[in-house]
Image (cartoon, rainbow, N blue to C red):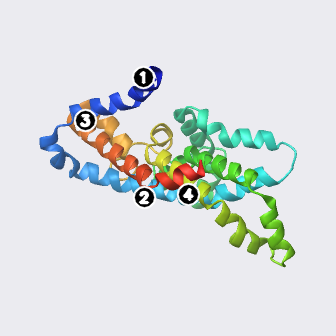
Amino acid sequence: MVLAVLGMALFVVPLLGLVARTPWNRVGELLTSPVVGDALRLSLTTSLAASAIAAVLGVPLAWLLARAEFPGRSIIRGLVTLPLVLPPVVGGAALLFALGRRGLLGEPIYEASGFLLPFSLWGVVVANTFVAMPFLVITVEGALRNLDPRYEGAAATLGAGRWTVLRRVTLPLIAPSLAAGMVLTWARAFGEFGATITFAGNLQGRTQTLPLAVFVALENNRDAAVAISLMMVVIALSVLVLLRDRWWKAL
């Protein structure tokens, strides 16, 4: 019990410190500044976009890893989960070397179309997707592996095609896990910092998300940094608590 309490304190005490340091008489003023408004809009836009892209790309990838047998599958799985343990700054550097103006793919794309991902809104989305999508892939892959194949087999024997089986049987059965993966993906994208600042920069109104705004504010406006941090905690915690029933069922 004592160890459990100490473990709980590890998560609770820092939040209490944040609450104790919050300038409550100025919170409204600090959170309604143009800088915070721009950063909040960018954070919500890019994290939701990253979650949508992760769903479109991650579900088929999870299905491939769970259901298909092919050489090098373990290596692919390792590469997919690598962003979970890779320092975000290293991930951002890798994106820059691959998709930057002089990157492996970025240079020919830029020369052909003039399109440049770094230091743009889409650069933030790509960075968020890179670091967050593994959460979705892992969750959905686990659900697919544990899914009883008899349900899909029964639908197939009744004449349902692959797309119908996927749409009417497979996806509804893994829906709780898919929802849990989406929540994890969004939360990770919402709080992403290292890959974003390395690949997309820290330009107010263009690429500066809430975590980047906190980083800047810590240098010159500590009260604003605390207020923004508290707002991020409230937003993320509210989403997790509101979806707690589906979360626990899926995990």
Question: Which residue is under mark 4?
Answer: 179
Residue 112 picture quarter: bottom right
Q: Are marks 1 and 3 in contact (CB under 8 Å)?
A: no
Residue at the top extreme, as displayed: 2
Q: Amino acid at mark 4?
A: Ala
Q: Which mark is residue 240?
A: none
Question: Which residue is under mark 3?
Answer: 19
In the image, what residue occupies the spot 68% across and 43% down?
A: 80
N-term mark: 1 or 2? 1
Vertical position of residue 16 compared to residue 106: above or below: above
N-term mark: 4 or 1? 1
Vertical position of residue 119 compared to residue 86: above or below: below
**Residue 160 image position (x, y, % from top left):** 80, 77
Question: Which residue is under mark 1?
Answer: 6
Q: CA distance from mark 2 to mark 4?
A: 19 Å
**Residue 240 image position (x, y, % from top left):** 44, 49
Question: Which residue is under mark 2?
Answer: 45
Q: Secondary structure at mark 3?
A: helix
Q: Secondary structure at mark 4?
A: helix
Does the image show residue 228?
A: yes
N-term mark: 3 or 4? 3
N-term mark: 1 or 3? 1
In the image, what residue occupies the spot 17% across and 37% down?
A: 23
Q: Amino acid at mark 3?
A: Val
Depth-wise, is mark 2 or mark 4 nearer the camera? 4
- Taking the image as shown, residue 214 lies to the left or right of residue 1, namely left
Q: Secondary structure at mark 1?
A: helix
Q: CA distance from mark 3 to mark 2?
A: 27 Å
**Residue 62 image position (x, y, % from top left):** 71, 53
Q: Residues within 10 Å of mark 1 (few under 14, many from 20)?
A: few
N-term mark: 2 or 4? 2
